[in-house]
Image (tube, helix red, strand yellow):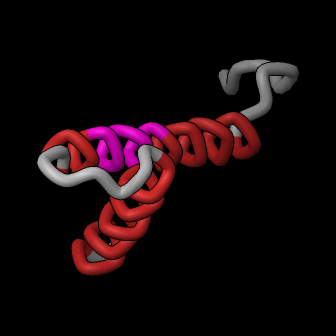
Amino acid sequence: MEHADSLISRIHRRAFEIYVQRGKGPGQALNDWLQAEQDVLRKREAAIDAAFEDSFPARDPPAH
């Protein structure tokens, strides 16, 4: 299970990347954070989905 500190750290890094990409203008910290949170969580969900698909390939017949 992922530690909350690790998740928060990744969101923080992504929010900083967004801040830099938009020219370091003030007043958008909350929007940067929310976008970063969405990006990080979407990426995490995609990784979980990929791991699940690798674990249970569709070509395997169902168990009886």
Q: Position of residue 13 (x, y in %)?
A: 41, 69
For residue 9, side relative to residue 22 (left or right): left
Left or right side of 38 for 48: right
Q: Is residue 37 magenta?
A: yes
Q: Which residues are magenta?
A: 35-42
**15 versus 63 height, above or below:** below
Q: Nearer the viewer, residue 20 or 5?
A: 20
Is residue 18 shown in magenta? no
Q: Nearer the viewer, residue 61 or 21?
A: 21
Residue 59 place in picture, x, y as percent: 87, 21
Q: Residue at x 33, y 75 (%)?
A: 9
Q: Quadrant of the N terminus?
A: bottom left
Where on the picture, by quarter, is residue 20? bottom left
Q: Quadrant of the C terminus?
A: top right
Image x and y of residue 55, in percent: 70, 45
- Report the front residue among 48 and 63: 48
Q: Can residue 50 be seen in this snapshot?
A: yes
Q: On screen, 40 above or below 4?
A: above
For residue 56, side relative to residue 46 (left or right):
right
Q: Residue at x 30, y 48 (%)?
A: 37
Q: Is residue 1 visible?
A: no
Residue 38 image offset from top left, x and y in percent = 33, 39
